[in-house]
Image: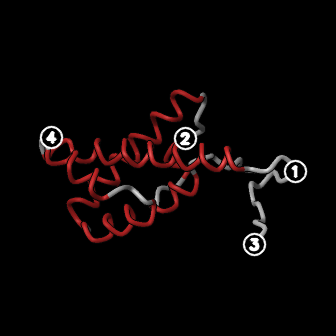
Amino acid sequence: MKTKHKYSSLLGVFEIEQKELGNLPDKENGFEDIRQQLRKRIAELIDRNLEKLKWILYRIDVPEQKLMETLANHPANEAPEIITDMIIAREQEKAKTRKQYRSKGDPEGIEFLDL
C-alpha cells in the first residue's frame, strides 16, 4: 500500500507523479526532492504554458501582488525558484491555519460553525 505524502495534493496540481520522487527516504531529502521537482515543473510551465501556471497559482492562493513585486526585484532566471518557494510557503501557511482551527474531536479538521 502506498503512503500518502503530505504534499500529494500539491504534486497532483502540478501533475508530478509521486514515483518521480522516489521513496523519499527521509524528511529533509524528501522535501528537497519535492522542491526540485516543483521548480522543474514551474520552469516548464513558464516556457510552455504560462496561463496554466497563473491558474495554478490562483488556485493555490499565492498572493499575486506579492509575487509580482518579488519577481520584479529578481532576475528572470530566478523565477522558478522564487515561485516554488512562494508556493511551499503558502502551503505551509495553510497547513498551520488548518492545524490551528482543527477541533480536538475531529481528526480531519472539519468544524461546523454555529450560525
Q: Which of marks 1 and 4 is in front?
A: 1
Q: How far across and how far down the image is residue 53, in percent?
A: 32, 64
Q: How far across and how far down the image is residue 2, in percent?
A: 71, 50
Per the rendering, the mark at residue 74 is 4
Structural distance between the alpha carbons of marks 2 and 3: 46 Å
Label 3 Cα crowd, 10 Å radius (few <14 / some 14-19 / many 20+):
few
Structural distance between the alpha carbons of marks 3 and 4: 46 Å
Q: Residue at x 51, y 55 (%)?
A: 10
Q: Residue at x 63, y 46 (%)?
A: 5
Badge 4 marks a residue whose secondary structure is loop
Badge 2 marks a residue whose secondary structure is loop
Per the rendering, the mark at residue 22 is 2
Residue picked out by circle 1: 105
For the residue marked with disc 2, what is the amino acid?
A: Gly
Q: Residue at x 30, y 59 (%)?
A: 64
For the residue marked with disc 4, what is the amino acid?
A: His
Is 51 left, or right, of 36 in this rendering?
left
Labels 1 and 4: the sequence-earlier one: 4
Label 2 Cα crowd, 10 Å radius (few <14 / some 14-19 / many 20+):
few
Per the rendering, the mark at residue 115 is 3
Per the rendering, the mark at residue 77 is none
Is 34 left, or right, of 79 in this rendering?
right
Nearer to me, 104 or 54: 104
Q: Residue at x 28, y 50 (%)?
A: 66
Structural distance between the alpha carbons of marks 3 and 1: 20 Å
Labels 3 and 1: the sequence-earlier one: 1
Q: Which residue lies furthest to the front in this view?
A: 115
Above or below 38: residue 115: below
